[in-house]
Amino acid sequence: MSLDVSPALLEQAERGEVDEAAFVDCVRTSLPYAWEMISSLVVQLKVEGGEFADNQTPPPDEQARGQLLRALASDAIRGALQRHFGVRLAFQNCHRVAVFPLDPSVDDRLARFTSIRGQLLNQSPELRDC
């Protein structure tokens, strides 16, 4: 299971509309490693500026890696995180998370990051098992 959903949140979903803030809180508590990773990158981007901020350090264990995969592979989770933090998220391999501002001036850099070429250039033998 990717999220620890409370009975109240599940009941909301069964009735129809779900409060996005409650969903984001569910993501925060269910995927703490992914949440902390994205949160820290958002802060780094705001403090240091630039076109993007990214993490290139592999997760400490498979549980952490799984959290990143669940957070970024789910359109609903990824979309909610992007709206919550006001950024665009990008992902390479099994751990390289990047946050980009919503500013269209970085669209070219985001396109390069998410390109086939960018993916191929980010390969290394150490990451073959992720």
Image (cartoon, rainbow, N blue to C red):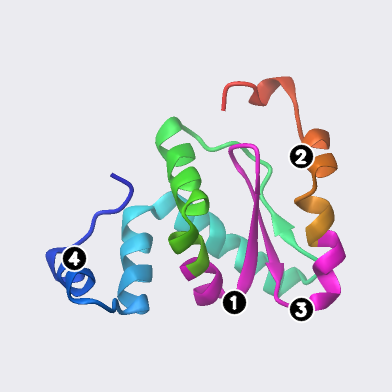
Image x and y of residue 6, in percent = 17, 63
Residue denoted by label 1: 86
User: Mark on residue 119?
Assistant: 2
The kind of residue on which mark 4 rests is Leu
Q: CA distance from mark 3 to mark 4?
A: 35 Å
Tell whether 100 sits left or right of 81: right
Q: Which residue is mark 4?
A: 10
Asked whether 26 falls inside the magenta stretch, the response is: no
In the depicted view, which residue is nearer to us: 37 or 20?
A: 20
Mark nearer the N terminus (3 vs 4):
4
N-term-proximal mark, 2 vs 3 = 3
- The CA distance from mark 2 to mark 3 is 23 Å
Secondary structure, mark 4, is: helix
Amino acid type for the residue under numbered disc 3: Asp
Disc 1 to disc 2, how far (Cα)? 24 Å
Q: Which residues are magenta?
A: 80-109
Q: Which mark is residue 8?
A: none
Q: CA distance from mark 2 to mark 4?
A: 37 Å
61 or 20: which is nearer to us? 20
